[in-house]
Image (cartoon, coloured by chain):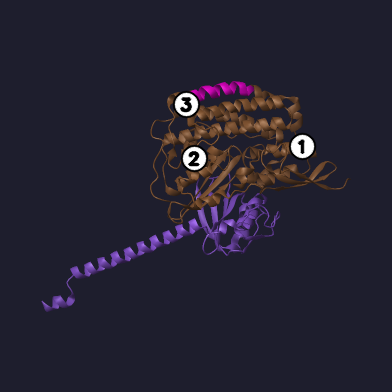
Amino acid sequence: MGKATIIPFGPQHPVLPEPLHLDLVVQDEKVIEAVPQIGFIHRGLEKLTETRDYNQFIYIAERICGICAVGHSLGYAETVEGLMGLEVPKRASYLRVILHEMSRIHSHMLWMGLAADAFGFESLFMHCWRLRERVLDLFEAMTGGRVILSAVRVGGMVRDQDAATLAHVQEVLEGIKDEYHEICRAFLNDSSVRSRLVGVGVIEHDDAVNLGMVGPFARASNVVNDVRCKGAGAYAELSDFTPITSNDCDCYARVEVRAKEILQSIDIIEEMIARIPEGPVFEKPKGSPADGAMACGALEQPRGECYYYAQGNGTKYLERMRMRTPTSMNLAGMAAALKGCDLADVNMIVLTIDPCISCTER
Amino acid sequence: MTVKQTYTDIELAQLLDLAAEKKAAGYRCVNTHCVNTVDGVDIIYTFVVDGADDVYENYRIKNVPHHGHIPSIQGYFPGVFPFENETQDLYGITVDDMLLDFHFNFYSTDVSEPMTVITPEKKAAMEKAAKIAKAKAAKAAKDAKAKADAAKAAAPSATEEKGE
């Protein structure tokens, strides 16, 4: 038995798009303990509610993270609407779900590209990001922005989408679907991919529940936890929704869940476009959140459940806005998954939780 | 999306029993966070049990003194370690007996306990809100007095009735 050594991993590392530090206690090339540390990019965004009113803060909220920009603006808007008892027009709810699911597609494709890059499959990485560009093109056609969309506001949407644009979205997504099946085949069936992922970083179902894991990371351990099941907003109008889960509990299962969720999101968007009602997309909010009023909301971000809390103080400024992001709930799970793994597998395991540190630190 | 939610105030002494009870009942701890107030810090714990009727149960401990101590619930819910360390760093509340304790070094911040700092903007907003509330109360008292005087003037007094 060799001597235990502490190997620092990150905060700057080729596999990490954002700074995360791990102290890996290693013995004979096996990780016996991993202590995660974040805190390098804390921006104090929640404090800014003191200087931005509830309408202005949505632009801060969507800048929490470039990948989940739509989700954060949506989660914030819905929580403030709950705080003020504001009913959003139905068409706006549909448009929000369409944009949010498109955001999930581009986030998962980005992640799949990064995963392919991490296990050395460069052409697969390029194909994933090539397809993702087409989703970003759709964002640009719909809102004028590719990353920060500023499409959602408290009370509804900034602008409506005409039938031609929605038909174009549907057409492009259908095209993506065909090409995506080819990429999926490589991800899920290729022997070199499977050899890097199968049986690596296993988290059993009971451990996933105990650690409070959320999102695809939890669903890959067969935890049925998806906020979309609660059927709030336009998700209630879906004819059927069953979260995608896997029993395998390893890195491969996490890839499989995300790969299938992209196709599920395309189906949701197509259903929303087919059933979107006519009508206004904005209801102007009146007054300010009442003093002492509290509301919480939850949203299924690409990485899992994101929790929002807002408290009013009788002015147009919120007393408190809290955003608890999915990665912060998954850090304990990541540390558990790293225990006992080979040192060479650390980068794959870290990546399969799809960490978003800028979200987590806010 | 807004979800079904409840809010309950609890005492600090009840926290560990509550955590044990929720853990035994299969809940997960969704979040813990703080709200800075003039009298201290309110700490809110949110629990949910997936499946049943999915109610987000929020429990609030009011007015924990600035620089006070609270017990850690990491023993029941290990996933909350980022929030408890955040509570230490951003609010200056010491969380006792944490399994993973970064000793006030989880976030690197220029200002210590930044979320308890009352900025000039916040102070101005608070003073404005207090002034408005005071003016509203004064106006309401004045209106009530005027109404009472008018009612008094309209009703014939008992002595006048006797005189007639």
Are dots 1 and 3 on a single chain? yes
Which tint was used for chain A? brown
Q: Nearer the viewer, mark 2 or mark 3?
A: 3
Residue pointed to by mark 2: A232
Magenta extent = A168-181
Q: Secondary structure at mark 2?
A: loop
Mark 3 crowd level (few <14, some 14–19, many ≥20, 10 Å Cα): many
Q: Is residue A217 left or right of residue A101?
A: right
Mark 1 crowd level (few <14, some 14–19, many ≥20, 10 Å Cα): some
Q: Please, is residue B19 above or below residue A130 in the view?
A: below
Residue pointed to by mark 3: A166
Q: Position of residue A283 (x, y in %)?
A: 39, 40
Q: Are marks 2 and 3 in contact (CB under 8 Å)?
A: no
Q: Nearer the viewer, mark 2 or mark 1?
A: 1
Residue A145, numbered label: none
Report how far apart the C-alphas of labels 2 and 1 lie in the structure: 39 Å
Q: Position of residue A244 (x, y in %)?
A: 61, 33
Q: Is A357 colored magenta in this rendering?
A: no
Residue pointed to by mark 1: A345
Q: Amino acid at mark 3?
A: Leu
Report how far apart the C-alphas of labels 2 and 3 lie in the structure: 22 Å
Q: Please, is residue B92 above or below residue A231 in the view?
A: below
Report how far apart the C-alphas of labels 1 and 3 lie in the structure: 42 Å
Q: Amino acid at mark 1?
A: Asp
Are dots 2 and 1 on a single chain? yes
Q: Is residue A84 left or right of residue A210?
A: left
Q: Which chain is purple?
A: B
